[in-house]
Amino acid sequence: MKSGNKTLIMIFLLGGVISFLSQCGPALVKDPWDKTAQARYYQLDRITASTQAAEAFRKGCLDIEKKRYNQAVKHFTTAVQHDGDLWEAFFELGRAQQAVQDYDGALRNLEQAAMLAPDRENVRVELAATRNNASQYYYLEAEKAMHIGGLLTEVEKLYKKALNAYPKNLSVLIGLGKYYLLLKKPLLASHYFQTVLDLVPTQREAVINLAKIHIAAGNYLKAQTLLTEAAPYHPDDDDLTQLLSEVKHGLSKGEKPSELILIQEKLAITRADLAALILVILEPRTLSWKSLPSFNKPIIVLDISEHWAHNYIKTVLEYRIMKPFPNHTFKPDSPVSRYELAGIINTLLHKVTTIEAVSLDNTPEMALHDVPTEHTLYQAIQNVINLKLMNCDEQRKFFPHSKISGNHAIGILSNLKKLFF
């Protein structure tokens, strides 16, 4: 045999041996998304002991290279089913799901990857980018549904999904604000517009919409402050100029009720007075609520439409701070008793996040001579006493049926506000 032929045979045999040994050695799979020369490689025999998971993972990566994303989702799903600790499979599954716009699945699996591999920077970066992409995708879907007149419940669902994906998406927050304005729910709308302004204090669209809500409610001073602070950042803005003109006209009419000014001097405040004080002193919109109130059932009140405190009463009812009576009346001119005020304050204490639940209802009780333990508001009275918002006299009498003066109510609500902030 000629030496040249021998050399060729040896080279062939050597190549076969090398190929065989390479199959026995570590299996390397290139990151299918990385097209650079610095591509990462997955070493399958080191990342999983499951041959089924390794094979499914390898097939998934091949699918990605061929742009067969739906097939990739199936293979990576198989991989995580065989090895629930294989963060690399959750990571690639999330990326494949994003490619087919299954953002719910993408976020779920990328979050699982981040939990399994908290020190992996590439996982954190991918998760952050996917949250942003998901938020924008659901926002555009919501806008599209609004444009074609889709079901409002579906629109709301899409907006909420966008917000959950990325809570600081200004477009989503403004979209939700407009959506609730369309539903005639200014309380919820103002919450989202204010959230925008908490992030970007002079954002034009949020300023204009929130100012309109304040003007509609007769809160001209709040609207004036909002517009005045934003005006230097939006010079020659016709909409801002027009709104400032409306505010000036509203203030010049002196529409602020004289009753509100006189509340401080009253010896016995009414339920309407209390509603006004709660709005002015506590500013419910600025509080950190455990959850926004549900508006599934409309609140029907028959005796406030012509009352000077109509807007104040409507707002405290919307926030569920005060309640109408079973016959759908508010009785705005009825005097407020000490036990009634204690009950309203207790409602606020349980609904605002800055008050820990452990500090309520479990504190040492003070035996009161004029409030039996079976009294409906017994625990509420104990809570306001323990928090030093209201007190009893030296004989441990609370005087639950006594009326509340304007000065006293203002002092109590001012101290309550300090607890919230």
Image: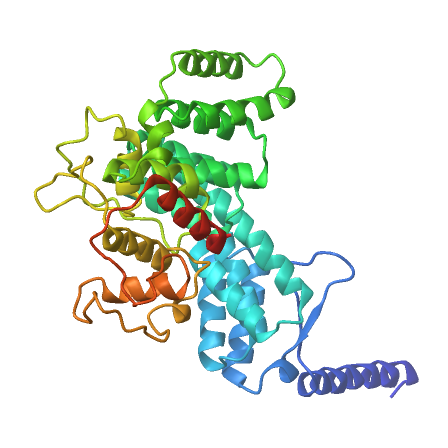
Q: Position of 397 compared to 418: left or right?
A: left
Q: Position of 205 compared to 122: left or right?
A: left
Q: Position of 299 compared to 192: left or right?
A: left
Q: Position of residue 229 (x, y in %)?
A: 59, 26
Residue positioned most to the left: 327
- Nearer-the-camera pick, 317 or 156: 317
Q: Residue at x 34, y 39 (%)?
A: 406
Identify the image quadrant of residue 139. top left
Q: Residue at x 46, y 63 (%)?
A: 108
Whether residue 418 is situated above or below residue 188 in the rendered picture? below
- Nearer-the-camera pick, 126 or 290: 290
Whether residue 216 is situated above or below residue 316 in the rendered picture? above
Q: Residue at x 34, y 66 (%)?
A: 394
Q: Position of 338 compared to 129: left or right?
A: left
Viewport quadrant of the N terminus: bottom right
Residue 404 shows in the view = yes
- Nearer-the-camera pick, 235 or 371: 371
Residue positioned most to the front: 395
Q: Position of residue 249 (x, y in %)?
A: 43, 11
Residue 101 shows in the view = no
Identify the image quadrant of residue 303. top left
Q: How is the image coloured?
A: rainbow
Q: Position of residue 160 (x, y in %)?
A: 39, 47
